[in-house]
Amino acid sequence: MRKISLLILYFLCSALYSIASDGPIQPGSFLTLDRCIEIALKNHPNIMAAKSTIEANQNLIGVFLFLLAAGPIGFQYAAEITFPTPEGTSNGLIQLFGQAAVVFVYIMDALKTSDGSFTVSLLLAVGLLIVSAAIITQLHDPHVGERAAP
């Protein structure tokens, strides 16, 4: 246990050292006007926010191209595995539970600590995942061995 603690301490110290040494201005370095402008452009909050917005929009393109394209396939698969149930019911339930994710985001925001940490809400999510897994393992298919309709 002591070796693991020392290893963790080593990694934390090396990470802190690398963060401290990668700062924009090194001790003993000379600053020219070009270097000052480069540092200012790199660290200006508005420019950083604009870069984040561009990255978010690029990620949305990926979601629209790849994730949403898989939606109809997922709906069809859900309709097939819930065969006696009408397709509209299974698809409607999938949509409903997808919208419940918005409620969970609001709950996460409400459980956020004063320093902005989401630890409590993430632990809640892990707990709910474990409870869901326990419930799913207790479910039994009543139609095991029956043939599905063509």
Image: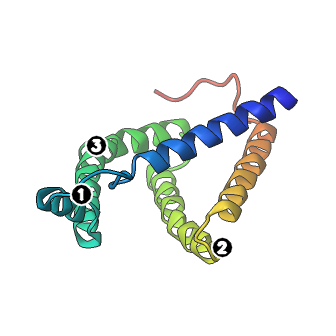
Say which quadrant the N terminus sits in: top right
In the structure shown, which secondary structural element does the residue marked by tag 1 occupy? helix
Residue nearer the viewer, 51 or 85: 51
Q: Give the mark, 3 or 1, whose residue is nearer the N terminus.
A: 1
The answer for how far apart the CA atoms under marks 3 and 2 are is 37 Å
What residue type is disc 1 on?
Answer: Asn
Vertical arrangement, residue 52 with respect to residue 135, above or below = below
- What is the basis of the colouring in this image? rainbow
Picture coordinates of residue 56, whole percent (x, y): 29, 57
Q: Residues within 10 Å of mark 3 (few under 14, many from 20)?
A: few
Residue nearer the viewer, 56 or 66: 56
Say whether residue 31 is left or right of residue 122.
Answer: left
Answer yes or no: is residue 82 visible.
Answer: no
Answer yes or no: is residue 5 visible.
Answer: yes
The answer for how far apart the CA atoms under marks 2 and 1 are is 28 Å
Residue located at (72% from left, 60% from top):
124
Which one is in front in this view, the residue at disc 3 or the one at disc 2? 2
Q: Give the mark, 3 or 2, whose residue is nearer the N terminus.
A: 3
Picture coordinates of residue 84, whole percent (x, y): 56, 43
Return the mark for residue 69.
3
* Residue bearing mark 1: 57
In the structure shown, which secondary structural element does the residue marked by tag 2 occupy? loop
* Residue bearing mark 2: 113
Picture coordinates of residue 101, whole percent (x, y): 53, 63
Vertical arrangement, residue 129 with respect to residue 9, above or below = below
Q: Residues within 10 Å of mark 1 (few under 14, many from 20)?
A: few
Q: Furthest residue to the right?
A: 1
